Amino acid sequence: MEREVNEEKRNKFIEYAGKRVNNVLHDIQILEPMARSNSYDFTKQDIEEMFSAMEETLKEAKEEFYKKFEEKQKATKKIFSFGSTPVSVETVEEIEEVEPSEE
């Protein structure tokens, strides 16, 4: 079962991530004409270094997103409660709110 998404935080993510991805795409697109221009000279090694750096940075960013996503998935656990479905899934934060504090 997937966890609930905070719509306010998701909307903020969509707004900012959309702008940032568009900036990255723009920067890649303005790099491309350099390949067709007679104003520049480059080697195969230059190409490999440029694209390896970009690919490695993209890979690291993607891994961070998946790492955070997996952490959020692990933060859910099954709990039992009387008078409800046999087992429900709640986030750790919700469970902590439900459990009475020790006196």
Image (cartoon, rainbow, N blue to C red):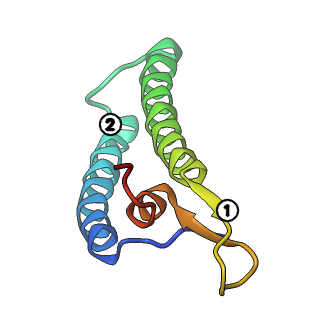
In the rendered image, residue 86, in percent from the top left (x then y), is placed at: 76, 78
User: Quarter holding the N terminus?
Assistant: bottom right
Q: Residue at x 23, y 61 (%)?
A: 16
Characterize the local packing of mark 2: few (<14), some (14-19) or many (20 or more) Cα atoms within 10 angstroms. Answer: few
Tell me residue 90's x, y (percent): 55, 67
Residue type for callout 2: Met
Q: Quadrant of residue 17?
A: bottom left
- 58 relative to 7, above or below: above
Question: Residue 54: x and y, percent?
Answer: 43, 31
Q: Which residue is mark 1?
A: 78
Q: Is residue 55 above or below residue 91?
A: above
Q: In the image shown, does 60 or 93 lie closer to the viewer?
A: 93
Instruction: Please tell me which residue lies in front, 80 or 39.
Output: 80
Q: Which residue is mark 2?
A: 34
Left or right of 34? Residue 79 is right
Q: Are marks 2 and 1 in contact (CB under 8 Å)?
A: no
Badge 2 or badge 1: first in the primary sequence? 2
